[in-house]
Image: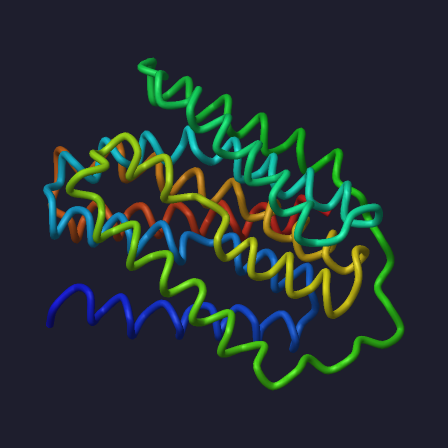
Amino acid sequence: MNTLVLKLILMPSLIAGVTLAARRWGNVIGGWLGGFPWVAGPISIFLALEQSKDFAAKSAMGSLVGCFSTYAFAWLYAKLAPRLHWFPLLMLCYAMIFGSLYIGQFYSGSIHLLFITLLLFILLVYKLFPRPEVPAHIAAPPRFDLPLRMIVATTFVAVITQVASWTGPVWSGLLTPFPIMTTCLAVFTHIQQGPAQCARILRGMVNSGMGYATFLYAVGLLLPHTSMLVAYSAAMACSSIANILTLKYLK
């Protein structure tokens, strides 16, 4: 099956699943599930299949760099959501992201140092996050909500992987953690449920950041030296363990 067809089948299913989980178990759990490498994983696999394993491994390191701006985005959006309309706030956050990504493209240090620094950064962001109370009632979303989320997320993943041949591994990696699923969750929640619940879902997403970073780190380390099956299976196993631990201990 063509990888583009796989993208168009897989991504709507993922965003739909996360959205429905948030409606069933609450925004913190929904955000936590949304922080898994649902997007980064498929993009990395597609890059390995369409470009090469070395290309995907280098992109994983770039993705670790890009994660700093992703979690900074979550904190900044949650912090300013009570005072700004969603559109200018989103543009401000995106400007911050692209500025930091431009700087991040010049990083050429150790992946080990990068991983440890990212974990500490995620922990700091999580501790600084606002913690609003659970609301007594949440209004039902409009009918177009879920299809629109699915279309937006799928389009972004298809574009990133299709242009990888001319962006190169560094920018393909930097753009992989671009918060498209986070944007969908944050903006739709901000509009429909208000800034407090937007903060809750974003805090849940940061909670699973440790697992996300672990996945990328494992891919970057293992992919050049093992098969794709071993590398991605080990990365997902390590990511799942990290996410289970953070869900238990990060409150």
| Whole-percent x, y for residue 226 in the image | 12, 40
In the image, 185 versus 214, the foreground residue is 185
Image height check: is 200 above or below 73?
A: below
Give the residue at x 68% y 79%: 141
In the image, 174 versus 53, the foreground residue is 174
Image height check: is 21 above or below 96?
A: below
Q: Is residue 222 left or right of residue 101?
A: left
Q: Which quadrant of the view contains residue 216?
A: top left
Image height check: is 21 above or below 77?
A: below
Image height check: is 110 above or below 216?
A: above
Give the residue at x 12% y 34%: 225
Q: Which quadrant of the view contains residue 154?
A: bottom left
In the image, 2 versus 113, the foreground residue is 2
Coloured how? Answer: rainbow
Give the residue at x 23% y 31%: 58
Give the residue at x 11% y 44%: 51
